[in-house]
Image (spheres, rainbow, N blue to C red):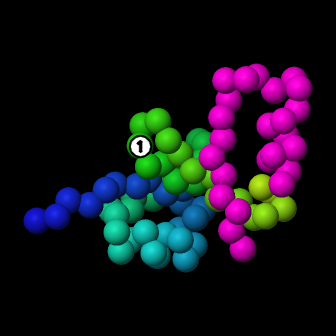
Amino acid sequence: METKVKILVDYREANSPVVEELRNYAEVELANLDAGDYVISKRCSIERKTCGDFALSLIHISEPTRPLYISYAVFCLK
């Protein structure tokens, strides 16, 4: 029997076509996530963004007052 990867998905993403596609490859569990939209491991979560939000995030994380230890993984989806 093949073991599927477990992905936690924020409940606000429940109707996303991304979740529907993920169900083909992983065990999807809806949860109330404090950060990120998708948690794929203890060390990695993913925030789904529109192109406009992605651009604003790049501006925000490049601000000189931003702590250097924060890192982001963002995807630009239409």
Is 3 a magenta residue?
no
**Quadrant in the rendering for residue 15:** bottom right
* Residue in view at x 44 percent, y 49 percent: 40
* Residue in view at x 34 percent, y 64 percent: 26
**Quadrant in the rendering for residue 55:** bottom right
Could you tell me residue 14's position as x and y percent? Answer: 53, 68
Residue type at the position of mark 1: Ser
- Which part of the image, by quadrant, shows the C terminus? bottom right
Residue at disc 1, secondary structure: strand
- Left or right: where 15 falls relative to 31: right
Judge whether 39 appears above or below 23 on screen: above
Judge whether 36 appears above or below 18 on screen: above
Is 60 a magenta residue?
yes
Give the mark count.
1
For the record, the magenta segment spans 55-78
- Left or right: where 16 falls relative to 2: right
The residue at which mark 1 appears reads as 41
Judge whether 20 appears above or below 26 on screen: below
- Left or right: where 22 falls relative to 11: left
Could you tell me residue 9's position as x and y percent? Answer: 49, 57
- Which part of the image, by quadrant, shows the N terminus? bottom left
- Left or right: where 25 falls relative to 39: left
**Quadrant in the rendering for residue 4:** bottom left
* Residue in view at x 76 percent, y 22 percent: 67
